[in-house]
Image (spheres, rainbow, N blue to C red):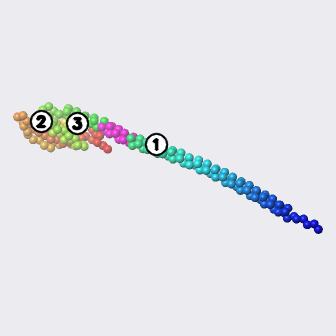
Amino acid sequence: MIKINLLPVRAAKKKETAMQQIALASFVFVVIAVIIASLYFVKRVQLAAAQEDIISANQKISELKKKIGKLEELKTLKDQVKKKLDVLSQLRTNKTGPAQRLESLSDLTPDKLWLTNYSESGQDVKISGVAFTDELIADFMKALEASNNFMSVELVVSEQTEMAGIKLKKFDLTMKLESTAPSGLKK
């Protein structure tokens, strides 16, 4: 009987299958490594893009903060200008009231009566002066009461004084400003 040694063929087939399996495993490993590497690079690109977006967003935020700061500055300047304009308009309305009252007071002052002091405090007015007679003071008070600018005229003091050797009547009056008179004191 002839004996055939089939072992080397089997061993060769086993070696060949083993080589095929190693080649297949190597191929699968390389494919998996390529897939993992490509996913890694894709994620790196996405991460870099996201970081660039974050940087640009932060730059936009800082620019917007600067603009907001400028807007706040403009708002405060606008408020300051508005306050100044309000003060100017109040001054414009106030400048005519006292001037008109003083003009009226000048027209109402009789001859031989001189005013030495005029002061306003809110609605209260105080006038001091000198006159030759008490009748002149009384006429002056009546004229003030009849005017459109003053009301509640009262004589506080009337006393005799001497100036340059002439006997005169020194007087002090208090009164209120007429409520219809222009007044810039309202808030």
Which stretch is magenta? 78-91
Spatial CA span between label 2 and label 3: 20 Å
Q: Tell me the kind of residue under disc 3.
A: Ser
Disc sitting over residue 131 in the figure: 2
Mark 3 and mark 1 lie on one chain; the one further toward the N terminus is 1
Disc sitting over residue 67 in the figure: 1
Residue, far left: 165
Q: Nearer the viewer, mark 1 or mark 2?
A: 1
* Residue 153 in sight from this viewpoint: no
Q: Residue at x 82, y 63 (%)?
A: 11
Label 3 sits on residue: 147
Mark 1 and mark 2 lie on one chain; the one further toward the N terminus is 1
Name the quadrant of the N terminus: bottom right
Residue, far right: 1
Q: Tell me the kind of residue under disc 1.
A: Lys
Image-quadrant location for residue 120: top left
Name the quadrant of the C terminus: top left
For residue 112, side relative to residue 80 (left or right):
left
Counting other residues with Cα less than 10 Å from the Cα at mark 3, is it few (<14), some (14-19), or many (20 or more)?
Answer: some
Image-quadrant location for residue 184: top left
